[in-house]
Image: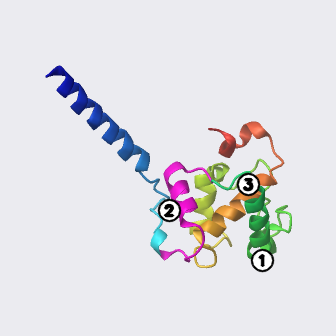
């Protein structure tokens, strides 16, 4: 009887842990805090990578040299007009240093929320122009060119 109870308790524990591991992050609008509607995103890209990101909040492309290059190639036409060719800042802020207009952008989740849903000023939502996968690729390039203090790089923390 004790073995049966132990087995049932173990099965329930595993089920609860598995359910928690599969739970997705709720992405929120940077300004309003309202949940972002992912169903409006431009289609395309690697959905499996985005699904992994939705579970962990960590960009799977960070540190992947091929992804970083693709991110740079996407950044140039999509973002450089406002943020500069090397993300040094122009009309929009620089993206390679320690200062974030929205401190949440120091995390991958927060940076994605700014890209997807937009922010104050001229930063409009990019879900019409970029797929979620393309946003993650661009984010990987932004993280790769970071010139700030590694201790402040929250996306590097486990």
Camera-side residue of 64 and 4: 4
Q: Residue at image x 85%, y 61%?
A: 88
**Residue 53 in view, yes or no:** yes
Asked if residue 54 is among those painted magenta in the image, a careful observer would answer yes
**What secondary structure is marked by label 2?**
loop
Circles 2, 3 touching at the beta carbon (< 8 Å): no
The residue wearing badge 3 is 64
Q: Residue at image x 80%, y 59%?
A: 94
Which quarter of the image is occupied by the N terminus? Answer: top left
Looking at the picture, does residue 56 appear above or below residue 151?
below
* Image location (x, y in percent) of residue 27: 50, 58
Looking at the picture, does residue 86 appear above or below residue 12?
below
Q: Estimate the spatial distance between the alpha carbons at disc 2 and disc 1, rounded to whole Å.
A: 28 Å
**What secondary structure is marked by label 1?**
helix
In primary-sequence order, the first of circles 2 and 1 is 2
* Image location (x, y in percent) of residue 43: 55, 77
Query: Which mark is in front, 2 or 1?
Result: 1
Q: In which quarter of the view is residue 24 placed?
A: bottom left
Q: In which quarter of the view is residue 121 placed?
A: bottom right
Q: Estimate the spatial distance between the alpha carbons at disc 1 and disc 3, rounded to whole Å.
A: 21 Å
What span is in magenta?
A: 40-59
Instruction: Give the label on residue 77, or none.
Output: 1
């Amino acid at each position: 009887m004790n073995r049966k109870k132990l087995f049932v308790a173990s099965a329930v524990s595993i089920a609860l842990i598995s359910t928690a591991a599969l739970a997705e992050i709720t992405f929120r609008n940077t300004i309003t805090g309202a949940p972002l509607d992912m169903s409006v995103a431009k289609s395309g890209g690697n959905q499996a990578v985005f699904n992994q990101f939705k579970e962990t909040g960590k960009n799977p492309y960070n540190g992947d040299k091929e992804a970083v290059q693709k991110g740079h190639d996407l950044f140039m036409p999509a973002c450089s007009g406002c943020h500069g060719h090397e993300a040094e800042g122009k009309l929009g802020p620089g993206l390679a240093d320690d200062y974030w207009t929205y401190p949440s952008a120091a995390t991958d989740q927060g940076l994605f929320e700014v890209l997807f849903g937009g922010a104050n000023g001229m930063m409009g939502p990019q879900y019409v122009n970029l797929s979620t996968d393309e946003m993650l690729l661009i984010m990987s390039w932004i993280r790769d060119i970071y010139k700030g203090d590694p201790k402040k790089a929250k996306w590097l923390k486990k």
